[in-house]
Structure formats: structure tokens, C-alpha cells
Amino acid sequence: MNKKVHVKTGDTVVILNGKERGKKGKVLAVSPEEGKVIVEGRNMVSKHVKARKMGEQGGIVKAESALYACKVQVVCPRCGKPTRVSHKIYEDGTKERVCKKCGEAL
């Protein structure tokens, strides 16, 4: 399995399918091993938490759940459109992620 993910922590992404389709959010965490990402405020699930310490409150907590990375697309900061990530290699050997639509660095 390919262990590369096209998004990085801090990227703004748009969700491509599911009940959250079309909504934007910021990537909080990336898991290349699983090929999943966690998007801030999206794909919320109810989690039952048990009180661990004396006096600590248990209950139902809302938390973000992971999405497959192939189900999200990076949003370009300049043109504001969902885009694929291209790479530009400079003469000095540095590599940069670039928007396919407008050519702006991501």
C-alpha cells in the first residue's frame, strides 16, 4: 500500500463525499499509515467516555473522526478552488507543492 498522503497538517481541505460533502475545514492530523486525515469540526461522532478519576465527569463527548485522505481535496489559498497538488522542482534541488489550477505555492 502507498504510504504517501497529498495533504499536510494545517492545509485547508474540502470534503468530496458523504454527509459533509462540500464543507471546508482545516486538517488537524494526518495518518499516512492508515491513509486517513482528521478535519477540524467535520465528521463528528459521539464518543462514550467513562470517568477515570474520582470526581471526574464521564458522559457522551463529540469528537472528530478520521476520513480517508482520498475523500478530501486541498483548497488553494489564492484562487480558493479545490485543486490537485502538483510539485515544482527548482534548480537548487528544492521541491515545492503547487496548485494545478493557478500555479500558486501551497
Image (tube, rainbow, N blue to C red):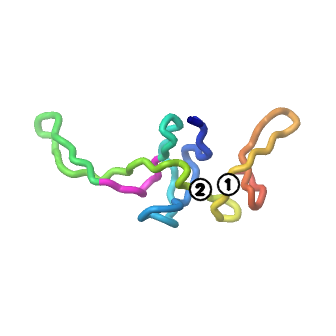
Q: Position of residue 93 (x, y in %)?
A: 82, 33
Residue at x 38%, y 49% (from the top left corner)? 65
Foreground residue among 31 and 17: 17
In this rendering, the answer to whether 10 lies above or below 34 is below
Which span is picked out in magenta?
Answer: 38-45
Dot 2 or dot 1, earlier in sequence:
2
In this rendering, the answer to whether 87 lies above or below 91 is below
User: Label 1 sits on what residue type?
Assistant: Arg
Q: Where is residue 55 in the image (x, y as percent from the top left)?
A: 12, 39
The label on residue 54 is none
Say if mark 2 contacts mark 1, CB within 8 Å. Answer: yes
Q: How many residues crowd mark 1 within 10 Å: few (<14), some (14–19), many (20+)?
A: some
Residue at x 52%, y 66% (from the top left corner)? 22
In this rendering, the answer to whether 76 lies above or below 67 is below
Q: Count the labels in the image.
A: 2
Residue 82, located in which quarter of the rendered image? bottom right
Residue at x 65%, y 64% (from the top left corner)? 80
Q: Is 59 included in the stretch rendered in magenta?
A: no
Q: How many residues crowd mark 2 within 10 Å: few (<14), some (14–19), many (20+)?
A: many
Q: Classify the position of the N terminus by image quarter.
A: top right
The local secondary structure at tag 1 comes to loop
User: Label 2 sits on what residue type?
Assistant: Gln
101 left or right of 64 in image: right
The local secondary structure at tag 2 comes to strand
Report which residue position mark 1 lands on.
Answer: 84
Report which residue position mark 2 lands on.
Answer: 73
Residue at x 70%, y 61% (from the top left corner)? 78
Q: Is 40 included in the stretch rendered in magenta?
A: yes
Q: Measure the alpha-carbon separation of dots 2 and 1.
A: 7 Å
63 left or right of 97 in image: left
Q: Position of residue 73 (x, y in %)?
A: 59, 56
